[in-house]
Amino acid sequence: MADETSRRSFLSALAATAGVASLPRAATAPSAGDLPTVAAVIEAVISGIPGAPRTDTVDVVKAGDPQQPCTGVVTTFLGTLAVLRQAKAMGANLVISHEPVFYNHLDKTDWLAGDRVFEKKKRFLDESRLVVWRAHDTWHTLRPDPVTAGTVAVMGWERYVKPRGGDVCEIPPVPVSELALRLKQKLGSHGVRYVGDPAQGVRRLALNVGASGGESHLRMLRQRDVDALVVGELHEWETSEYVRDSMAAGWPKAVIVVGHQASEEAGMRALADWLRPRVAGVSVTHLPAGDAFTYV
């Protein structure tokens, strides 16, 4: 009941400012007058996920007027300026980003006032009339977590997932070094790092995509039957040091760091596939943000 009340309150507030309309059923390309509003597309995501939205969610409209008709949707790991420009060139006006737009978790911008990078990005959003909505907590709420499931699918590990929740896989044994290379190739990472013995065999691995922090990582690593943990990113004084101490103590473990974007991009591609049949007549495309780093 509390979840449903939260959802209704969220949608009521959105409707008050954005004129939420019901989604059209037409399969052919609708005219502008028949298009759902951006707010209605956002509602289609939220209403399709039990338990969404959380009352303290970061998943709010970050820019733009959601009252306008939705001319197209782009999903992405992160709404970079390059992704926003590409979305505009495609004719889309709703960008659904998994991560923040303005360089901090809550997208607070007071501290950025006058910064030329922030001002240029904000000006582009204002002039293009793009709407940016974040789908982080909402998308992670679905069970099994579609962000983790997206990575599992790219790796071809669906048949190896253990029933406990989708974050542990029992794969054919493979050395840590070879597993790291496979992750790099299949996830499109520019660089993968690991802590552990390169020759150590991995049979049971745990997945913790994104950047959930050391405590979450250690809860997985402390399971005696988990040989290795695959993460998006980590703090270099937490998980990596726990693994190094574990090895020194005689209990070999490994952690493989694939990069935040590489670990979650597939999950946002999955959102595009999931949303497409729910918004008939509206184009839904995934645009990868890509890895920001150059490795030497």
Image (cartoon, rainbow, N blue to C red):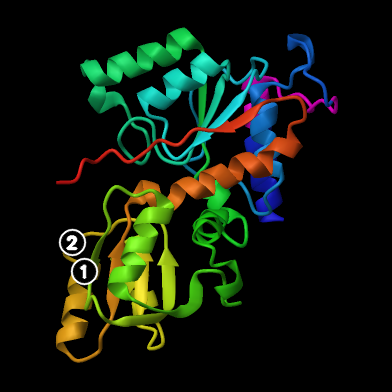
Gap between marks 2 and 1 measured at Cα: 6 Å
Is residue 16 within the magenta segment?
yes
The residue carrying mark 1 is 240
Label 2 element class: loop
Residue under the point 48% across and 11% down: 128
Query: Residue 33: x and y, percent?
Result: 77, 10
For label 2, the crowd category at 10 Å Cα-Cα, with few meaning under 14, some 14 to 19 and many 20 or more, is few
Residue closest to the eye, 267 or 139: 267
Residue reaching furthest to the top: 127
Residue under the point 69% across and 53% down: 50
Residue under the point 25% across and 20% down: 117
Residue under the point 22% across and 59% down: 235
Is residue 163 within the magenta segment?
no
The stretch of residues the image draws in magenta is: 13-26
Q: 46 left or right of 81?
A: right
Query: Residue 200: x and y, percent?
Result: 28, 82
Does residue 130 lie above or below 199 as drawn?
above
Residue reaching furthest to the right: 26
Label 1 element class: helix
Q: 167 left or right of 7?
A: left
The residue carrying mark 2 is 236
